[in-house]
Amino acid sequence: MEFSIIRNIIYLAIILISCVIGLCNFKLSNKVFKLLTCFSGYTFISETIAQVSSHVNKTNAFVHKIYLPVHLIFFCSIYYYLFQAKSWKIRATISSAILFVLIVIYEKYQEKLVLPAYGIMLEGILLVVFSILYFFQLIKNPIEGKLTSLGEFWLNSSVLFYFSGTFLFWATFNYFYFNKLSFMPYMMILWVLNIIHYSILGLSLLMHVRGNLSSHGKIKR
Amino acid sequence: MVKLNGEFFIIFLSLTIFLMVLGLGISLFVVYYHKKRTEYAQEKQAMQNTFQREMLKTQLETQEYAFHQISEELHDNVGQLLSTTKMLIGITERNLPQPPDSLKTASETLGKAIQDLRSLSKSLSNEWLHQFNIVDNLRAELERLNTARQVLVSFTTNSKTLPLEPQQQVMLFRVMQEALQNSIKHAEASAIGVTIQLADGSVFLCLADNGTGFNAELATKNGLGLMNMKHRVKLLGGNIVWVSNINNGTKVEIRLPVQKAEL
C-alpha cells in the first residue's frame, strides 16, 4: 500500500474518532461541542469524497470550494457561542458574513480546478483573531476549574495553531506550485498540521464530556 | 534539487519557529491565566468573607436588638410585677400577727427571683455587648465552672484586654465556650487549662484538657460543632487547630492576627 494512502487513512480515522467521541456524548454536550461534532462529521464526509475524487478525477478542488464556506459557517457559529459579550457576538457575525460573501464571490470567479487558497487564508486570519479574542475573554473572566480540563481551551488552542499554520502554508504554497517544484515533502507539513488539529479537537470533545460528567452528570454551561 | 532543499528548509524552519512562538504564546497565556485566576479566586474569597462577616454582624445586631428588647421587658415589666408582688407580700406579712413560714419563704424566693432576673436583664442588655471583654467574661465563666465543682479549671493570661472589636470578642468567647463544653461533656475531662497570650502581632488562645481525646482529623471534617468553631475563627481571620489522641487529652489552639498598632 502506498504511503500517501496510509497517510490519508490515518487522517480520516482521526477525524472519524473525533466525530464518534462527539456523537457518543452528543446529549451531554453544549451547543459549541454539538456544532464541533457536526463539523467533524461534515469534515469526514467531505475529506472522504475529496480523497476518492482526487484518485478518480485527479482533482478535489470542487469539494474544497463547497467545504470552505460551510467550514466558515461552522467555526463562526462555534465562536458565536463561545463569546460571552453581545458586542463580540455581533462583530463575529458581521465579519463572518462579510467574509462568507467574499469567499463565495471569489470562488465563483476562480478557475474550477484551482483550490480556494486565498479564501482559506482569509478564513484563517479571521479565526486566528477569534481565537485570540477568546483567550482574552478567558483572561477577563477566568473559570473556576482547571484550564487544561476545559474543552474550550483545547478547541481554541487547536484553532490558533492550525489556522496560523495553514495561513503560512497557503501563503507559500503558490510559490511551489507555480515554480513546478516538488512539494510533496511540503504537503507533509499540512498533513501533520491536520493530524494535530483533529487530534486536539477530539481531545477537546473528550475533555468537555469528562468535565460535564465530573460536575455530577450535569451540563455546566 | 539543492535549491528546493534550501527553500524547503527555510520554509520548514520558519513554520517551526512560528509554531514554537505560538506554543510559547499559549504557554505564557496559561501562566498569566493562572495568575489571574488566583487573583480572581482570592478576590472572590475576600468578597465571600466580607459577605459572611456582614451577615454575622447583621445577625449579631438583630440578636443584640432582640436581647435588648427582652432585657427591657424583663426589667420594666416582669421585674416591676415581681417587685410589686414582693412589696404586697411584705405588707401582708407586716399586717399578720403570726405570718406563716411559707409566706416568709415565698418572699425570700421572690427576692432571689428578682435578683436573678436583674442579672439576666443586665446580661442581655446592649451595654453588656458593647463593653464585652473576653478576658473578664472567660475568667467569670471558668470561676463559675470551678464553683460548680464539675471540673478543675486554671486560667492564665498576660493581658487584661484583647485588641479586638467587642463583637469579635463575643464570637471568640462563644468558640471558647463550645470548647469548654466539649471538654466537659464529651471528653469528660477532670482538669482544664485555659491560656490567653497576646504577643508578636497575634492573640493566642489555648485550651488543654485531660479528657478522653478524639480522632482530630476525622472529627474536624465531620463534626458540626467543630466545623462551626472553625468557621467562626476563620471569619475572624485566624486559624484553629485541634491536637488530640484517643485517651490522651485534647489541646485546642486558636491564633488570631491583630494589628500591631492595637497592641
Image (cartoon, helix red, strand yellow):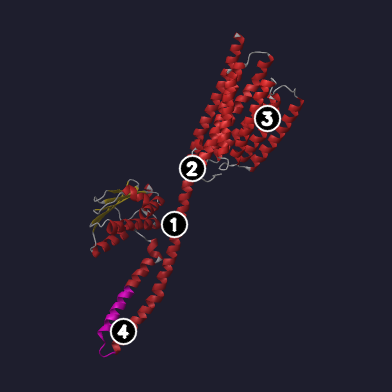
Q: Which mark is residue B219?
A: none
- Return the chain for callout 4: B
The alpha-carbon separation of the residues under discs 1 and 4 comes to 47 Å
Residue B116, quarter of picture:
bottom left
**Residue under the image location 55 percent in, 43 percent down:** A28
Q: Compute the Cα span from label 4 to label 2.
A: 76 Å
Judge whether residue B146 can be spotted in this image: yes
Residue at label 1?
B56
Q: Is residue A84 above or below residue B183?
A: above
Q: Which mark is residue B90?
A: 4
Quarter of the image where the C terminus of chain A is located: top right
Residue occupied by mark 2: A214
The secondary element bearing badge 1 is classed as helix
**Quarter that holds the N terminus of chain A:** top right
Give the residue type that dot 1 points to.
Leu
Instruction: Kindly report the distance in space between the C-alpha atoms of the residues bearing marks 3 and 1.
Output: 61 Å
Is there a contact, CB below 8 Å, between mark 2 and mark 1? no
